[in-house]
Image: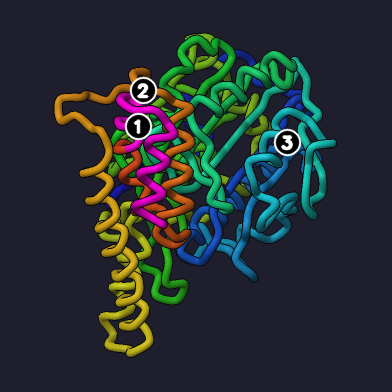
Amino acid sequence: MLSLAIPFLFVGIGWAAPVQENQEAIWAVLVAGSKGYWNYRHQSDISAAYQLLIQRGVPKSQIITMMNPHRGKLYNWPGGPDVYAGVEVDYRLQDVNLGNLKAVLLGDAGNITGNGTGRVLKSNKQSHLFFYFTDHGAFEALQLPTGELIMENEFTKLMKEMMDREMFGSAMVFLEACESGSMVENWGTFNNVFAATAASATEPSYATHCLDFVLDTCMADEFSYNWMDTARRLSPKESLEGLTILTKAKTKRSNVQEIGSLQMKTRSNGAYLGSHVSKTLAQLDYKNYTAQATQPTWKIPLIQLERRAASGDIKHVQNLRIFTQKLSKLEHVLEKLKHDLPISSHFKLSSNNFDKNCYGEALQEFINRCSDRDIDSFALRNARIFASACAHQETAAILKILESSCP
């Protein structure tokens, strides 16, 4: 079993700065950057985080949600409560887009589009921000349900702009996505930000509770499931580093990363997640999970389709055939791109030896032209091809190659 028991109100990894007792200082933005039933877990992760913040005393008026929940109830673990009950969704469907996300984080109500509530951050330099994002990712990229990509350089620039506008005094950022460590590698100079990611810059993240045959999908992501399980049972006085150390110990399939100054690492988790001690949270019947119930997130659609098709049902067999045909087409395109793009076998890609603007434009064009939303997680596993190409050739030339490969 993949488990690490934590007694309620455990404190001992390291005492933190005094807990922020003024809950009005806390603002949270929770984003599920996906849609579709295969991504059920992202919506349940966000809903579970919402419930945690409410139970910890964070005002609903200071929690902004962007998500596409499955109709009805949402469960984050087998036999658990409906985590969607009472969740107020601010932005959903096409309104969960890059423009709206930027407007929310920068407090620009005038730049919000669509049919959402229009709510944005109204925080200030005294505020403590918690930003939590869960979805698919790639090398220096996160994806939104519109197919739009948030690139590392753009995300870093956004964080700097938030600091310039004094949108927070300090921030806690948790990212749940494949290769999510690559999104924060250049944050070492952010003295007032603590970040933790589900995986390193080179590995996938994992989903868990994937063997529920009633829901027939994964109910949670491993890192998210573990940080929330830990936070539910942890004293609000425990440090951010303490929360992360315990989460790392429980997360077996990927390597949880953290970055932050000593000052931030020693801050209390209650300053960002709420400082109210909730016995209700600690008494939840939280379930352990097995290695067999844990799957690489990028591969989940194929795994689930294969499981369904094993029943012999004609409809499921046909759905699997259609999906594998899409993957075969994608593989053919990738082979052509590897041949046509100027990639040296001797080139060793790092976080700062390629044109990042070129990379963002090329990867977005690849996703738009050569992939479908249901196989994007497979396409994104090949993102480094384009980063490497952008170290050797101009953007226009790469886009022309993409146009010929995926007309």
Q: Residue furthest right?
A: 110
Above or below, 374 against 133 in this view is below
The residues bearing labels 3 and 2 have C-alpha atoms spaced at a distance of 30 Å
Coordinates of residue 25 in the picture (x, y in percent): 76, 25
Q: Are marks 2 and 1 in contact (CB under 8 Å)?
A: yes
Q: Which residue is mark 2?
A: 354
Residue drawn 84% across and 36% down?
110
Estimate the x, y position of residue 369 in percent, counting from the top left: 45, 53
- Answer few, some or many: residues within 10 Å of disc 2's Cα (few below 14, many 20 plus, some between 14 and 19): some
Q: Determine which quarter of the picture holds residue 218.
A: bottom left
Residue at image coords 69%, 16%? 169
- At label 2, the amino acid type is Phe
Please provide the residue range marked out in magenta. 386-407
Q: Residue at x 55, y 59 (%)?
A: 35
Residue at label 1? Answer: 387
Nearest the viewer among 110 and 229 is 110
Q: What SS does tag 1 mark?
A: helix
Of the numbered discs 2 and 1, the one sitting upstream in the chain is: 2
Could you tell which of marks 3 and 1 lies nearer the N-terminus?
Answer: 3
The reply to whether the magenta stretch includes residue 389 is yes
Quarter of the picture containing the C terminus is bottom left
Judged from the image, the secondary structure of the residue bearing numbered disc 3 is: helix
Q: Which residue is mark 3?
A: 104
User: To which quarter of the image does residue 23 belong?
Assistant: top right
Q: Residue 61 at what x, y percent from top left?
A: 81, 41
Q: Report the front residue among 19 and 223.
A: 223
Residue 367: image location, x then y, percent: 44, 50
Q: Amino acid at mark 1?
A: Ala
Main SS class of the magenta portion in the image: helix
